[in-house]
Image (cartoon, rainbow, N blue to C red):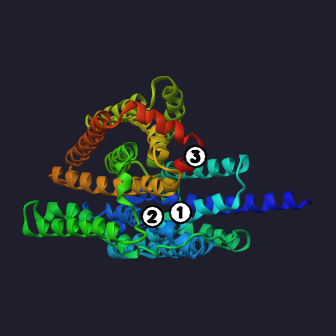
């Protein structure tokens, strides 16, 4: 066997290992959704607190994502990858062993921290291990496909595991996968660090932004119990704003900030991240409340609930394929506006659901509109998120885009869950559905707001130029 063939096979195994870990991390953002009713019943979660099973994972994941990338540069990507997979695997075991709501939420937070170490390290390992050219393009394409498809697979796999075994197995499944990834990584993943490692490590910035976002989310969730105008709600809200303001001040003073705030002067980047926050808020809430609707109203088991989302996956893929052709013909801004408009109509359709609505007539049309809208929106969002920034800022821009997805989903779910709880005035099916449809209405409002933001802030010429500049790094940005 020639040296070149042996080297190629070695890095090919490296790509498989990091993609396996990335799949596990992305999967966990959605795999718990269809298991939520079982978790709620077994651990006695209150309806308003149940969302923390999903939310705390996304908040910690998103809050420490940029720090994870910086830590890999400073201390070694392989070292951080191994630490992240180890932490994620151990936290998954704790999740499955949880006996109380507090235990599970704490373990999910630990799992989110592990994910924040794994994901940026995995991508960096690919870009530093695989040679430039067609091989790296294929590797990045595989990584992007895993990142995009993991969430959709999670819904179906979560239903299968919950129905065939129990909800604990949506977490236990990570343990053997994580152990295999660790064993392979120890043998095949090489170590690498950034050539320049000056500037320090902004742990304070990461702690402030994550703490501020967690406190803000907690304030929104508990406002229904405390009262929106109560001293406790106002005090917690002021504290969360103060912590986030402190984060902004720190970023302007430290030598190597977690986020260089001046990057938001790039119009395309700022618009893409704002729209992504709104999109993920509406989309994650859709998965959350739809899972509850299927199981609590129509009596679906977990597997049937997961299967009900298959048209969503197909629609997103179809929308993504169509959007690339539409962009070439109509431009980025037009396709982006059309995608968000379709998504708005899809969630608006869901507001007409009743306890007696059938799956085909009541649900599928909304899924089709929402899925096609998301598919059409996500591709141009991905293109303009980094295309308008300098090459030196590509990593930061990509990290911000990924962070917007996680934080947007967490904050959106917090708001819509609080709205749903406030609109639910009983335990009858009609009362529960009224809460769900109210949340869908607010979700539609989030997407409609994104339409206004894009129409007002994005310039067609800048958007098209950014998309053209991003073509060379599309696989990287999509991850």
Residue named by callout 3: 473
Crowd rating for badge 3 (residues with CA inside 10 Å; few <14, some 14–19, many 20+): some
Q: How many marks?
A: 3
Q: Identify which residue, 145 or 333, lies in the foreground.
A: 333
Query: Which residue is located at x 52 percent, y 29 percent?
Result: 322
The image shows residue 61 at horizontal and vertical percentages of 43, 64
Instruction: Name the foreground residue: 357 vs 228.
Output: 228
Calculate the distance from the C-alpha at mark 3 to the C-alpha at mark 1: 16 Å
| In the rendered image, the vertical position of residue 270 relative to residue 88, given as above or below | above
Local SS, label 3: helix
Residue 223, visible in the rendered structure: yes
Which quadrant would residue 321 be assigned to in this image? top right
State the image quarter where residue 167 is shown.
bottom left
Q: Position of residue 387 (x, y in %)?
A: 49, 44
Q: Is residue 355 visible?
A: no
Residue holding disc 2:
66
Horizontally, residue 255 falls left or right of residue 423, namely right
Spatial CA span between label 2 and label 1: 8 Å
**What secondary structure is marked by label 1?**
helix
Q: Which of the numbered marks, if any, corresponds to residue 345? A: none
* Crowd tier of the residue under label 2, counting other residues whose Cα lies within 10 Å: few below 14, some 14–19, many 20 or above: many
Q: Position of residue 376 (x, y in %)?
A: 45, 34
CB-based contact (under 8 Å), mark 2 and mark 1: yes
**Few, some or many C-alpha atoms within 10 Å of disc 1 (few <14, some 14-19, many ≥20)?**
many
| Residue matched to label 1 | 120
From the viewer's perspective, is 13 left or right of 216? Answer: right
Q: Residue at x 57, y 57 (%)?
A: 23
Please tell me which residue is depicted at 45% across the width and 68% down the height of the picture. 67
Q: Mark 2 or mark 1: name the one nearer the start of the chain.
A: 2
Residue 280's place in the image compared with 326, above or below, is below
Q: Residue furthest right?
A: 1
Q: In the picture provided, is 58 more to the left or to the right than 173?
A: left
């Amino acid at each position: 066997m020639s040296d070149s063939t042996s080297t190629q096979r070695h890095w090919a195994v490296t790509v498989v290992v990091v993609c396996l870990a990335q799949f596990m991390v992305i999967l966990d953002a959605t795999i718990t959704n269809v298991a939520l009713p079982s978790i709620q019943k077994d651990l006695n979660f209150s309806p308003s607190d149940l969302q923390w099973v999903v939310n705390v994972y996304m908040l910690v994941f998103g809050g420490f994502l940029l720090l994870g990338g910086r830590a890999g540069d400073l201390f070694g990507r392989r070292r951080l990858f191994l630490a992240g997979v180890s932490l994620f695997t151990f936290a998954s075991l704790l999740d499955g062993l949880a006996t109380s709501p507090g235990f599970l939420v704490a373990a999910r937070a630990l799992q989110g921290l592990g994910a924040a170490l794994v994901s940026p390290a995995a991508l960096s390992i690919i870009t530093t291990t695989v040679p430039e050219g067609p091989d790296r393009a294929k590797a990045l394409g595989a990584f992007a496909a895993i990142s995009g498809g993991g969430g959709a697979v999670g819904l179906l796999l979560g239903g299968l595991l919950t129905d065939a075994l129990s909800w604990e197995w949506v977490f236990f499944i990570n343990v053997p996968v994580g152990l295999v990834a660790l064993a392979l990584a120890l043998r095949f993943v090489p170590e690498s660090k950034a050539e320049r490692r000056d500037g320090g490590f902004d742990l304070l910035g990461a702690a402030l932004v994550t703490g501020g976002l967690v406190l803000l989310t907690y304030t929104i969730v508990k406002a229904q119990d405390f009262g929106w105008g109560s001293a406790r709600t106002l005090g917690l809200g002021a504290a969360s704003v103060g912590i986030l303001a402190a984060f902004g001040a720190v970023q302007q003073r430290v030598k190597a900030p977690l986020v260089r705030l001046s990057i938001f002067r790039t119009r395309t980047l700022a618009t893409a991240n704002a729209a992504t926050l709104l999109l993920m808020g509406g989309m994650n809430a859709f998965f959350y409340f739809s899972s509850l609707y299927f199981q609590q109203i129509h009596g679906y088991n977990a597997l049937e609930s997961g299967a009900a989302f298959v048209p969503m996956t197909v629609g997103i893929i179809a929308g993504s394929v169509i959007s690339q052709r539409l962009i070439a013909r109509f431009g980025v801004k037009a396709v982006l506006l059309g995608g968000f408009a379709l998504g708005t109509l899809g969630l608006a359709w869901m507001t007409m659901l009743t306890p007696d609505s059938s799956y085909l007539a009541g649900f599928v049309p909304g899924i089709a509109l929402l899925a096609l809208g998301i598919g059409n929106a996500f591709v141009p969002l991905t293109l303009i998120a980094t295309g308008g920034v300098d090459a030196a800022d590509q990593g930061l821009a990509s990290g911000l885009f990924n962070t917007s997805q996680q934080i947007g989903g967490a904050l959106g779910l917090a708001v819509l869950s609080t709205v749903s709880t406030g609109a639910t005035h009983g335990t009858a099916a009609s009362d529960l559905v009224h809460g769900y449809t109210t949340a869908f209405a607010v979700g539609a409002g989030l997407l409609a707001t994104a339409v206004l933001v894009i129409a007002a802030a994005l310039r067609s010429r800048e958007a098209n130029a950014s998309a053209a500049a991003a073509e060379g790094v599309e696989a990287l940005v999509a991850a």
